[in-house]
Image: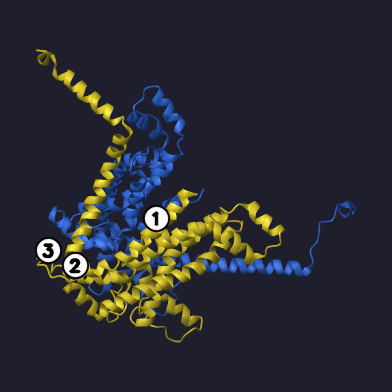
């Protein structure tokens, strides 16, 4: 006891100060919780709808926020067995891979040239490419639908593989330029002095150290493809050719009847992986869109 | 005689060397590498845009894409169309209302997220979710939450004693407009908040401390230090979010289809109805073209801000 008393006293704050601090703390967490609830309640709603029994879901006397009957996998089963969900997932994977391939083949050289070489018009070209990211699908979907039809791609998923690079290329080129600029000039200059060609310097020196940047654009190209809705809705109408997002939000409505359980099951299955992956890349996205204004 | 001596392999070598030599020229190298990107954009953005312009002055339909030239007839019809005028007004209402709310809520949220607290990363991860999930999917979840019979929002409102019978959110004009704004805010708030947090935390701590020593209060600090430093970033974020909200049709299309009685259409959704559902390419393209000024203003503003930054 005596030992305790001899310890130096901690500075004590007045009761008023502590009360104010506590009040601020409570207010902080209260407001923050409101934001969190607003952000994720729809996801919770998808979740609870997915696993509820139909009789539970459509019973107005039940508390809708919780399970009133045992959870069930019926809606998920319906989604996989009675709809083309699996086909949509496969279509999305195919189109996504095609778009990623086109994007990389086109973006990597363009971003490399624009970031590391100056030639007449290079600055304007860089900005020009970025600005096309602002062109909205809703401005071009009518003429593009005619072009797609002219190419015989009407109502096929490949029409989307052709059109999606129009927004992945501007965004990814811009993003990659940032990555390429970070590679010190000295190392390519040293390679050039040693007799390496420009192309050789790109393939042997800069690209190997830019793998993280290239992986980032792969992720972005893929998630942008998964999120797109307007072109998908305009160009594709047969269920067999649909992308997963479009399929989920259109094919689970038959006439006036919404299959909410299965619709939300599909929504949940599509959202979770995208949300998870995207979460890690949010800062890169923000950095990309603000044009590297932030460090 | 010497020509005969040149074997195919030799000639290939010469061509290869010449090409390689050309490619080592900085200009040639640059243009060759950028060419595919430019070609793609010209063919699939520039060319369709030219077609869109042609559509607006012709009577093109899905069955007859190369319609006769009709001059400004489409524009006259569109401007006289009450639904279009309402859609134009709605586009502005939705964009401005969502943007104002996003700015207010986004700033609040940004300051909350700047504090160092336990579980900050997780909270931040949860907050970002609306921006990360595909927009069409998020909108469907809200449509279900606004369902006329099973609306969970009405259930909560009734049980909290806010109202005895909730509105039919998507079936009445004003509630439908509110719903659309709420969903727009829900979707874009995380983007605004994250850009703001990134901007604010990029302000050097020393400057703030110096200002504190000089006795600057919160408002002064915010006005004289934060705003000038983060303005360029905020400006670009605002621009993207304005252009994307202005030109979006997904929220309106999935939630209300422009109903009740065509009162919630926006330019983009009405262009879709006219051009794709009814097949009137000419008129649809004319309506779409009203999105172009917004995009142009956005592009010019972005250009100016980028230029200002490279001059620094």
Q: Which residue is mark 1?
A: B303
Secondary structure, mark 2, is helix
Chain colored blue: A
Label 3: how many Cα within 10 Å (few below 14, some 14–19, many 20+): some
Instruction: Please report whichever mark, 2 or 1, sits nearer to the chain's N-terminal start.
Output: 2
Instruction: Please report whichever mark, 3 or 2, sits nearer to the chain's N-terminal start.
Output: 2
Residue B81 is left or right of residue B97, and the answer is left
Q: Chain of mark 1?
A: B
Secondary structure, mark 1, is helix
Mark yes or no: residue B212 visible: yes
Chain B: its colour in the image is yellow
Mark yes or no: residue A236 visible: no
Secondary structure, mark 3, is loop
Percent position of residue A164, x then y? 27, 53
Percent position of residue A268, x then y? 37, 60
Q: Which residue is mark 3?
A: B65
Q: Chain of mark 2?
A: B
In this orientation, which residue lies closer to the viewer: B123 or A142? A142
């Amino acid at each position: 006891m005596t030992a305790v008393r001899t310890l130096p006293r901690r500075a004590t704050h007045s009761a008023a100060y502590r009360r104010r601090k506590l009040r601020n703390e409570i207010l902080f967490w209260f407001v923050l919780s409101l934001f969190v609830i607003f952000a994720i309640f729809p996801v919770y709603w998808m979740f609870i709808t997915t696993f509820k029994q139909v009789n539970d879901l459509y019973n107005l006397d039940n508390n809708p926020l919780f399970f009133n009957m045992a959870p069930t996998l019926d809606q998920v089963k319906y989604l996989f067995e009675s709809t083309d969900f699996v086909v949509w997932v496969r279509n999305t994977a195919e189109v996504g891979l095609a778009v990623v391939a086109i994007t990389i083949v086109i973006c990597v050289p363009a971003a490399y040239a624009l970031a590391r070489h100056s030639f007449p018009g290079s600055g304007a070209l860089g900005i020009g490419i970025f600005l096309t990211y602002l062109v909205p699908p809703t401005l071009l979907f009518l003429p593009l639908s005619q072009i797609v039809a002219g190419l015989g791609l009407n109502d096929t998923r490949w029409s989307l593989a052709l059109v999606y690079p129009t927004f992945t290329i501007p965004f990814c080129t811009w993003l990659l330029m940032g990555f390429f600029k970070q590679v010190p000039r000295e190392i390519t200059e040293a390679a050039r002095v040693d007799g390496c060609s420009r192309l050789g310097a790109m393939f042997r020196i800069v690209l190997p150290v830019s793998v993280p940047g290239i992986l980032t654009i792969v992720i972005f190209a893929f998630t942008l493809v998964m999120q797109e809705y307007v072109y998908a809705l305009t160009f594709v109408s047969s269920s067999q050719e649909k992308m997963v997002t479009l399929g989920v939000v259109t094919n689970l409505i038959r006439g006036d009847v919404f299959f909410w359980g299965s619709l939300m099951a599909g929504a949940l299955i599509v959202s979770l992986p995208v949300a998870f992956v995207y979460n890690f890349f949010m800062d890169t996205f923000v950095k990309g869109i603000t044009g590297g204004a932030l460090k | 005689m010497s020509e005969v001596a040149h074997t195919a392999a030799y000639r290939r070598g010469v061509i290869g060397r010449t090409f390689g030599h050309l490619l080592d020229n900085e200009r040639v190298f640059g243009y060759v590498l950028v060419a595919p990107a430019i070609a793609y954009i010209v063919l699939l953005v520039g060319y369709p845009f030219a077609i869109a312009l042609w559509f607006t002055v012709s009577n093109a339909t899905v069955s007859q894409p190369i319609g006769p030239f009709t001059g400004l007839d489409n524009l006259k019809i569109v401007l006289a169309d009450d639904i279009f005028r309402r859609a134009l007004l709605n586009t502005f209402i939705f964009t401005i209302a969502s943007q104002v709310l996003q700015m207010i809520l986004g700033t609040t949220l940004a300051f909350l997220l700047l504090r160092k607290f336990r579980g900050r990363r997780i909270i931040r991860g949860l907050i970002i979710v609306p921006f990360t999930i595909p927009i069409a999917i998020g909108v469907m979840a809200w449509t279900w939450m606004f369902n006329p019979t099973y609306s969970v929002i009405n259930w909560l409102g009734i049980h909290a004693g806010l109202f005895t019978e909730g509105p039919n959110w998507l079936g009445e004009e004003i509630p439908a407009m509110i719903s659309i704004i709420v969903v727009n805010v829900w979707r874009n708030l995380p983007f605004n908040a994250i850009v703001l947090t990134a901007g604010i935390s990029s302000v050097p701590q020393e400057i703030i401390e110096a200002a504190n020593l000089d006795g600057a209060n919160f408002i002064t600090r915010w006005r004289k230090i934060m705003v000038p430093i983060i303005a360029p970033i905020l400006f670009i974020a605002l621009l993207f979010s304005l252009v994307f909200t202005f030109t979006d049709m997904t929220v309106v299309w999935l939630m209300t289809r422009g109903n009740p009685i065509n009162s919630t259409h926006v330019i983009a959704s009405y262009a879709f109805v006219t051009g794709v559902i009814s097949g009137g390419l000419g008129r649809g393209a004319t309506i779409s073209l009203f999105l172009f000024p917004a995009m142009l203003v956005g592009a010019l503003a972005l250009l100016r801000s980028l230029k200002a930054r490279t001059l620094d």
